[in-house]
Amino acid sequence: QVQLVESGGDLVQPGGSLRLSCAASGSDFSLYDMAWYRQGPGKQRELVAQITKGGGTNYEDSVKGRFTISRDNAKNTVYLQMNSLKAEDTAVHYCNAALKVYTSTLNDYWGQGTQVTVSS
């Protein structure tokens, strides 16, 4: 129902910046809570940032103040601006779309991932 395509991953030096983009298609984008997750080598996938259909945001503690999630409903796109990148931010980053009613998730969709590597 929803197809997600991430882009923007790259190799950057510590302290550098990247902006990830996630383009959605297939359903009404404005109805979905959107999020970015990441999975580093040998680690579990973890939530990085989320933005609700109403525009509210939440961040994982280690990225708070450095990353900003935003959405443009007219373009069916969600962004993750990443500043002051650290080596520990190295991971495959995945876009997620969740259709929710209150706290219950009815549908959950994932993109293919985009690699972010932070190294000197």
Image (cartoon, rainbow, N blue to C red):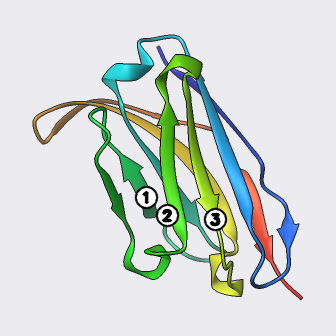
Tell me the crowding category of disc 1: few under 14, some 14 to 19, or many 20 or more residues within 10 angstroms, Cα based.
many
Label 3, label 1: how many angstroms apart (C-alpha)?
11 Å
Q: Residue 32, image x and y in percent?
A: 35, 28
Q: Residue 56, image x and y in percent?
A: 28, 47
Front residue of this view, candidates 112 and 66: 66
Dot 2 lies on which element? loop
Q: Is residue 15 above or below residue 25?
A: below
Q: Is residue 1 above or below residue 41?
A: above
- Give left or right: position of 88 versus 101: right
Front residue of this view, candidates 79 and 39: 79
Dot 1 lies on which element? strand
The residue at the point 43 percent across, 74 percent down is 64
The residue at the point 47 percent across, 75 percent down is 65
**Kind of residue at disc 2:** Arg
Q: Where, by quadrant of the figure, is residue 91 drawn?
A: bottom right
| Label 3 vs label 1, nearer the camera | 3
- Please give the residue where the numbered disc 1 appears in the rendered image: 49
- Decide if residue 40 is in sight here: yes
Locate the C terminus by quadrant: bottom right
Q: Residue 94, image x and y in percent?
A: 58, 49
- Please give the residue where the numbered disc 3 appears in the rendered image: 82
Q: Please report whichever mark, 3 or 2, sits nearer to the chain's N-terminal start.
A: 2
Q: Where, by quadrant of the figure, is residue 118 drawn?
A: bottom right
- Please give the residue where the numbered disc 2 appears in the rendered image: 45
Label 1, label 2: how many angstroms apart (C-alpha)?
12 Å
The residue at the point 79 percent across, 71 percent down is 117
**Kind of residue at disc 3:** Met
